[in-house]
Amino acid sequence: MEEKKVNHTELEQNAPETQAQTTELSAADKLMQRLKERNNSLIEDTTSTVKTSEDETIKTIVEPVEVEISAQPTIISEEVKVVENIVTIEKEDDVNKEVPKTQKIEKHTSEHVIITSDIEEKEDDAHENLTIPDFTVMIREEMLVKMSEYAASDNPLAYNKAVQLLKSAYYTKLNEEKAEARNKFVEEGGDLKEYNPEPDSNETTFAEAFKDYMAKKSVEQEKRDKEMQANLAAKLKVIETIENLVNKPEAFGETYKEFQELQSKWGAIGLVPKTEQKNLWDEYNRVREAFFAYVKINKELRDLDLKKNLEEKIKLCEQAEELLLEPKITKAQRKLQALHELWRETGPVVYEKKEEIWERFSTVTKQINAKFSEHMEAVREQQEKNLEAKLFLCEQAEELGTTEYPTRKEWKDASDKIVKMQSLWKGIGFVPQKNNNEVYDRFRAACDKFFGRIRAFYDEADSEREKNMQLKTELCLQAESMVESSEWRKTSDFYIKLQEEWKKIGPVPTKHSDKLWKRFRKACNLFFENKKTHFSSRESEEQINLKKKEEIIELIKSVDTSKGKQEAVSLLKDYQKQWTEVGYVPFDKKDTIYKVYREALDEKFGEMKMETTRVSESDFDERVGMIRNANNSDDLAHTEIGKLRNKIDRLEADIQLWENNIGFFANTKNAEVMLRDFNKKIEDSKSQVAQYRKQIKQLSEIK
């Protein structure tokens, strides 16, 4: 049976961009040209009427705003993009022009905000607030669920970046799993020419979900482009209406009210094509300036408007200053861009406060930009260190690929080293984009060369396959003899042991391989289906317990730690007690729900600045107290001790692996970074083991 392949090229095609209609853009250009010509004429007429009585004062509010949007170069590591968005600011000099006697025109030059960004202006809320999960830690089944969710979304454009990262992570993991399966097959003595994996339905379903998403995205993009053209026409209509206000007879109350309504209407209109944004804003600001030049706004209303704008800009300054406390600098920089957009849309302030308020806002902007620049520099430095480590692994793999190994054991030892190198490679991290493909191709070529040689070696080792067939036939007979057993746990262990033995035996002649496997799998599946039927009645109770624990998590998240630490701690302790009183949940949800529970508790204790170690010890002491007061305290203590010993075993296994890795790199060059990381992991794990042993001793004293 041939392995089913997916056309990745087809999946990577982007949805086509919808072209704007030439006739609509042409009409828009004509309307804007006509508005400019009319404005020039009106300004010339105004020059002749500037001279008024000595007691009259005309104050003109001018608020030009420019927005420049340019895409900075991106740093794309192996599977992730690092985007630099820096908010830069400029400010023109103030210009005051005096006219004879008491007649005076005050011209306020507003702050110019230049935003450098590679994202579209005013993206919808769903896109701005979208948190992209770390897909690299998911299994492929979870990735398929996420892709199905994105494909079913009513707003596909909001998930474009997430979908692209998800697709990259999925096929990276898929290729790794295929390579590991193939390598394992070869290591166990299999003939690579006879390697024939089962078709992967998960891969096919993922490809179909991605295709559905791209189709919905294309339709939504076309719809959005049409809406932008309609919005452009609507905004041009607003500009034309404002332009015509200056030709109305002087009726300040009605005219100014209409002007305010037009400004609100302008703000309510949605996105326009990016190619028209700057010209559109320039034209909008020009007609606003013309309006204020022609309409005599009384001082009381003008001062009220300036005061309101000052209050709004003070709020924006406060929000920007709060971003200095945001631990995630990329999130703070993204929010700062949004604040600059609001600043641009807010009108001028009183002249006496203009310099002060702008200096406050621009100072915060510079501080956040400096932090973001430092962050990006640290990312680049880490990528250079990762590159150095991966080049070292390339050298080691190339050396193994050219060494001669006369015995099967030596080939096995060398193969283990290659597999360990591949594992280290995955954990090192990303490298600079310019080096990514080169270093990956070099390492893959070295691995391919090694496994090509080991495959040739094992091509000559077919004598054991007949013996393996006899052993696997005996396993089939044993599996078939226990399918009706009702000793579920004991028999489950028996079947698991049979499956482990099956894996150890190695390949059999190809013509018998599929038949033997189906026979063995049928017997195993029959028993586990019987077991599943037996335990199905327990699932409903576990689902109820899962719901209860989810409700407890929501209660923990709702605790307001700002009203008092003692009250908050008391509530959290009560919720912890409720959690322990709830029974079992479905096994496949156990780790996930507990992780969410711990994260919620850690977040609340973190808000109260309580140390993690103190919180953990407090949790354990509370658990010991509950066990001591329970009727079945001995059983509960025994169960808890078993869990702690399992944790110790896993940590000690990790410590041994890391110590072996240290020995592997101890006498090599340029390995300081990896050695330092391994030593830190070993130190932390040993400390955790000591804490677990202390807890076991405490539980053992319960009588």
Image (cartoon, rainbow, N blue to C red):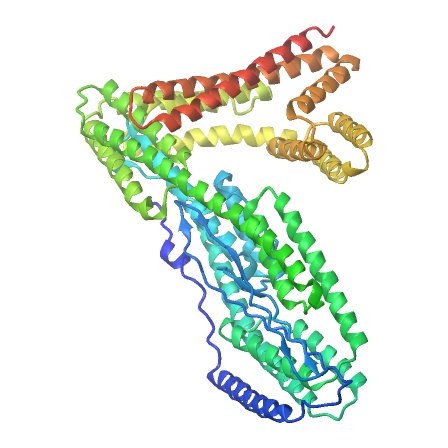
* Left or right, 450 with reference to 389: left
**In the rendered view of the protein, which quadrant contains the C terminus?**
top right
* Left or right, 389 with reference to 557: left
Rendered image quadrant of residue 226: bottom right
Rendered image quadrant of residue 486: top right
In the image, farthest residue toward the front: 101
Spot occupied by residue 197 in the image (x, y as percentages of width and height): 36, 39
Report the residue at 42% width, 53% height from top.
74
Most foreground residue, 123 or 99? 99
The answer, for residue 7, to whether it is visible in the render is no
Most foreground residue, 200 or 282? 282
Most foreground residue, 318 or 480? 318
Where is 13 relative to 671, above or below? below
**In the rendered view of the protein, which quadrant contains the N terminus?**
top left
Where is 13 relative to 443, above or below? below
Most foreground residue, 145 or 169? 169
Spot occupied by residue 137 in the image (x, y as percentages of width and height): 50, 38
The answer, for residue 445, to whether it is visible in the render is yes
Spot occupied by residue 488 in the image (x, y as percentages of width and height): 59, 22
Where is 201 relative to 308, above or below? above
* Left or right, 222 with reference to 313: left
Where is 232 relative to 387, above or below? below
Spot occupied by residue 164 in the image (x, y as percentages of width and height): 46, 53
Instruction: Give the tally of numbered discs.
Output: 0
